[in-house]
Image (cartoon, helix red, strand yellow):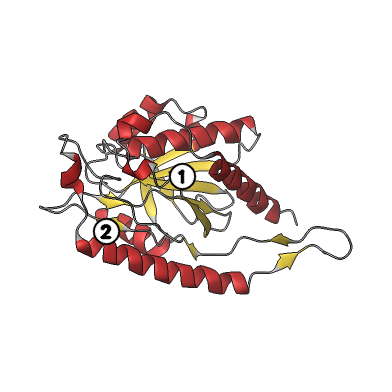
Amino acid sequence: MVDTPPRPPDATETAHGSAHDALRPARGFWILMFATIVVVGGLAFLQFLRTPRVGAGRSGGTIEVILPEISSVPDMTLTDQNERKVNLLHDLRGRVWIADFVFTSCAAQCPVITQRMVELQKALVDGGLHEVRCVSISVDPERDTPEKLREYAASFKAPDPANWLLLTGERSQIRDLVTKNFLLALQEETANSPILHSFKFALVDRNGRIRATYDVMTDEEQYENASEILGTPMPADVKSRIIKDLKSVLAEARR
């Protein structure tokens, strides 16, 4: 993951309609974001250097670069919207999945991110990639009960709701999962600051390895009022790249 710092209004909990300018992250959040970029960028580059290539160039075949391994998910059990226990490492083993991080009371960019997860699932269904699972993990787990997550999912009318997991758990679990495993930024709510988190999607392979992250919002959109961009599609090139990478990872097991 090479995380781009979200701008002030992004991913901010605005349940009470806080003013746009009041949602600026603290200076420490920017420091955290910069450190995350440096660390993850270095890890991804080192992994890329030792990632094997397949195919042959001189014989006319194409050379394919396998996606690097950025990190991996932990042996961690969370609870889904139907109150079932889901272990990220064991229960999802053998499934390729796309993850994002949201919270249900967010009135800023979270609905946009969720709408784009639903958009991606429709593209997967239309493309016959039914085996890919969508996973949304709450960064406000104490408020986001399974019931709230179930209602939240229903409001977005996903084309394959049975294949969309919305997960909640303990706050410390989620914090470690986001920052230590997915290597993304997260600033928890304090008395003076709302929740701030990354808007990226992440691709996880059959073995629980995190292989890529994606900016599903443009830089310009991260400055916009969420209500003005809700319903607009994710950048076409990003969606195309996600689908291409998913096909590559799905094909790895067949090589």
Q: Nearer the viewer, residue 216 or 115?
A: 216
Q: Is residue 105 left or right of residue 4?
A: left
Mark 1: give few (<14), some (14-19) or many (20+) Cα within 10 Å.
many
- Point out which mark residue 254 bears: none
Mark 2: give few (<14), some (14-19) or many (20+) Cα within 10 Å.
few
* Residue 49: % across, % down: 61, 74
* Residue 123: % across, % down: 58, 33
Q: Is residue 55 left or right of residue 98?
A: right
Q: Can see residue 151?
A: yes
- Amino acid marked by disc 2: Ser
Q: Which residue is mark 1?
A: 216
Q: Is residue 50 left or right of residue 79?
A: right
Furthest-left residue in this view: 191
In the displayed structure, would residue 67 be above or below residue 133? below
Residue shown at 87%/66% (left/top)?
58
Question: How far, Cα to Cα, is label 1 from label 2?
Answer: 26 Å
Q: Quadrant of residue 157?
A: top left
